[in-house]
Amino acid sequence: MLVMLLPLCALPQEAPKEGGRGHHGPPKNLKILKPEQLRPAMESFRAALGVQCTFCHVRGDFASDENPHKNTARMMLTMVQEINAKFPGNANARTYVTCYTCHRGQKEPATAPPTAAAAPGE
């Protein structure tokens, strides 16, 4: 399942602070990801969307579902997993799409290519 995140998850991870998982504590309220998938997935979301943690999380209560972006992220993660799993001829669970495929470092993915600037002399 995490295979689709691996290309974006190769970012360096900061070492956990004393007492386990840094200032956030042990993971809570996980519905899709496993605890060992959490840090790489969050780093990949941050890079793919160009956002910080509080774009999806409530500051001080990362387990909270109060921020609607968190549930959107869960739906999008499920969508990416389904696309990769159903890709024709994907017996080896290869990654074809990631969050970055559409988002390209932006909160909102582009739904059309940018308009081409007119070339000089046209």
Image (cartoon, rainbow, N blue to C red):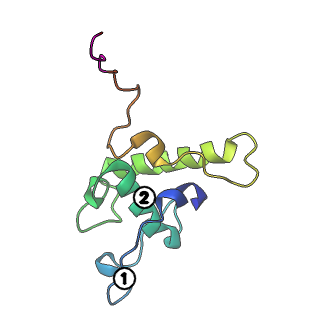
Mark 1 or mark 2, which is nearer the start of the sequence? 1
Please state, as top left, top right, bottom left or bottom right, where the C terminus lies in the image: top left
Does 114 sit left or right of 4 as displayed? left
Helix, strand or loop status at disc 2: helix
Does 100 sit left or right of 87 as displayed? left
- Residue lying furthest front in this view? 121
Residue 119 placement (x, y as % from top left): 31, 17
The residue under the point 33% across, 21% down is 115
User: In the figure, 33 relative to 122: above or below?
Assistant: below
User: In the figure, 86 relative to 31: above or below?
Assistant: above
**Amino acid type, residue under disc 2 in the picture:** Ser
Which portion, as a residue range, is magenta? 117-121
Magenta part, dominant SS: loop
**Amino acid type, residue under disc 1 in the picture:** Pro
Residue 13 placement (x, y as % from top left): 40, 73
Residue 59 placement (x, y as % from top left): 23, 63
**Splitting the image into 4 quarters, where does residue 60 fall?**
bottom left
Helix, strand or loop status at disc 1: loop
The residue under the point 72% across, 47% down is 90
Please state, as top left, top right, bottom left or bottom right, where the N terminus lies in the image: bottom right
Q: Which residue is mark 2?
A: 44
User: In the figure, 79 relative to 53: above or below?
Assistant: above
Q: Which residue is mark 1?
A: 16
Does 59 sit left or right of 26 as displayed? left
